[in-house]
Amino acid sequence: MCQAGEGMDKQVAKDIVLKALYEVAPDLEGVEVKYDADLRRFYDIDSVDYLSFIIKLHKQTGRDIPEADYPKLTSIDRAVAYLAEN
Amino acid sequence: MRDLPVIKKQRREGGVQPNLQHYDETYASFSWRDLAQELTRGHADVGADSSLNIASIALDQNLSDGRGEQVAVRWLAAEGDIIRDFTFAQLAEFSARFANVLRGLGVCASDVVCTVLGRIPELYTVCFGTLKNRSILCPLFTAFGPEPLRMRLDLSRAKVLVTSRNLYERKIAPMRSSLSHLSHVILIDVYQEQILLEGTQSYGLLMAHASPVFHIPPTRPEDPALLHFTSGTTGTPKGALHVHQSVMVHYATAKYVLDLRPGDVYWCTADPGWVTGTSYGIIAPLTVGVTLVVDEAEFDAARWYKILQDQKVNVWYTAPTAVRMLMKSGEALPQSYDLSHLRHAVSVGEPLNPEAVLWSQRVLGRPIHDTWWQTETGGIMVANFPVMDIKPGSMGRPVPGVEAAIVSVVNGVLQPITEPNVEGELALRVGWPSMFRSYLNQDERYKKCFIGGYYLTGDLARRDADGYFWFVGRADDVIKSAGHLIGPFEVESVLIEHPAVAEAAVIGKPDPLLMEVVKAFVALKSGFSPDEATRKDIIALARRRLGPAVAPREIEFVADLPKTKSGKIMRRLLKARELGLPEGDTSTLERPSAVTDLALQSGQGVATGGSR
């Protein structure tokens, strides 16, 4: 687990993001998901799924993700970058 | 009952007064005939042979009223700070072109045109073009999976589908060959002939070649106009069919309930795939000549406050789930936005909880006014009006022109309940213009909704001594989640397609955000273990086939399901157990299973060991 403010390794971040996504939407496992595509617009992730996704990321990493940052995690790439940079 | 403070309304000093200033007087003197005169500027006596077309009233009439150059739709793109404005004159022309497109394709009056579209500008053109051609508009939800889409396209016998390339490729193309009625698929975002997908046409190309002039053929008030699907406890979804004179209710409620006036900026956050997004996201507000704000993006608290501020929204129609999501984002956030243009806030979808009403009064500086209606009613039926004191948690009082009652049905006879605060079924006296005229091709189910001159809503409610109505619950097993009705049968049918599932029962589990979430109780076939992998696999199937809005969000494995002696699964019993309520009369139960009871009570699933 990382401390807030300390970016994590990108590969680790990617594993965490994908795991959280597949837990929320197991239908995406095995599907080719474009890493830069908005999950909510192109992969049927609705508002409730998205909230669950963020809560799972929070639980996995132990870091707070303030509400104001929610729009920064809308694709796999963006979520990985967020975890890696923050 | 908790004692909650009543929000008192005082007459505004100066400034804008509500359209409806004296509820009781207006309710007593109201007539639909007068309303029709007002709506058509005295041109139409809405008799059986007169012409009344929704598109003509909601769109074209704004041109003769001198609003041609006013912005009708202000569209905010999801990405980049892109704003596109469309005037009434432009929308009138575009929709005339689309009506010509349909005519050119051989699409006739009463043919069904389905849309599976997000909040994009073309939606408005397609909607009004379809109505101008006197075809029937049937909006479907983009978050539906292929199964609900296939079912609805089939049941409606849709001749035309308008959607986007992405949605078509993911959800429609794989099953296209089974959609035997579907003649034309029009893709909004495909512009060049060479990249067109097989069996589809380009919206842009069709529009470019269509004439901008279209004369709306005479449209009778009783001609069909809108088809909205809703769900029952059993069987297939029901297509509630509405007629052109529904626009009278749209207009009356836009005026009295939404308190709209020409030139207002209005924002309806509902998805256009459902009845609210059509009736109040497109039609009703334009009958009054307002500017619609349309946001393509998904929910985001900061973005929403910014839209209310930057677009100077005067009237806002949203949903309890969205309000609760805003509440979750904290009270500090809205303080940094200027919401002073907001004059009136309204909600629909499920009962707005009292905390949300009080929160909005405290944080937004104005209470959110809850309303009640359903797909079948075609428009708002019961509401909290701007002029009326709000009792937080109540749906308010009937709209002028609508007669609401609490009733019980005993041995097939309707009995009104007049005593205050006694629970019964909410019923509406037949006769309001936007009442559904059929469940498409399901006459028996339609007839069952009516008794003694009343439409039975399926909602349990009570009326207090002041005439305010209070929602109590559903009379059937239909699930209410995020403002949408979900039929348990539709979900169960997909669950039992999974090779591991022997039986499934689906209920609405109370949820602080969505009112209810879809929860499935699943009994596995022997040889399958109730583990995480199985659970994920079943959820994956359900999401792929049904889409996220309909698929269960929770699965609990049980040894078997409680059934009546005739073998019917008792969802109500499962729900009672889930809620920890008394289980009621279980004497008709087939064989209450001790193992199941134990598992349900402890909230832990158990493996099914026996064979089936």
Image (tube, coloured by chain):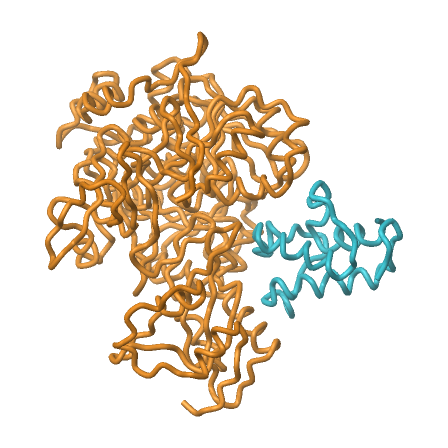
Chain colours: A cyan, B orange
* Residue B56 appears anywhere in the view: no
Residue at the extreme top of the image, as rendered = B14
Tell me what residue is drawn at x 50 percent, y 67 percent: B542
Q: Residue furthest bottom?
A: B611
Where is residue B346 drawn, in percent x and y?
Answer: 44, 32
Question: Is B145 left or right of B226, judged from the image as shown?
Answer: right
Q: Quadrant of residue B428?
A: top left
Task: Give the answer, above or below, for where B313 lies relative to B113.
Answer: above
Compare residues B420 and B275 and report the one nearer the observer.
B420
| Number of marks present in the image shown | 0
- On-image quarter of the C terminus of chain B: bottom left
Residue nearest the observer in this picture, B273 or A32: B273
Q: Is residue B130 left or right of residue B204?
A: left
Q: Is residue B597 visible?
A: yes
- Residue at point 54% right, 20% down? B341
Image side of residue B336 versus residue B530, left or right: right
- Please report the residue visible at 20 percent of the width from the left and 28 percent of the height from the top: B51
| Image quadrant in which you'd find residue B220 | top left
Locate the N terminus of chain B and report the quarter of the image it occupies.
top left
Q: Quadrant of residue B369?
A: top left
Establish if B232 lies above or below B214. Answer: below
Q: Position of residue B174 (x, y in %)?
A: 49, 65
Q: Is residue B513 above or below residue B589?
A: above
Residue B127, x across and y down, in percent: 39, 38
Residue B464, how many percent across, how many down?
A: 28, 38
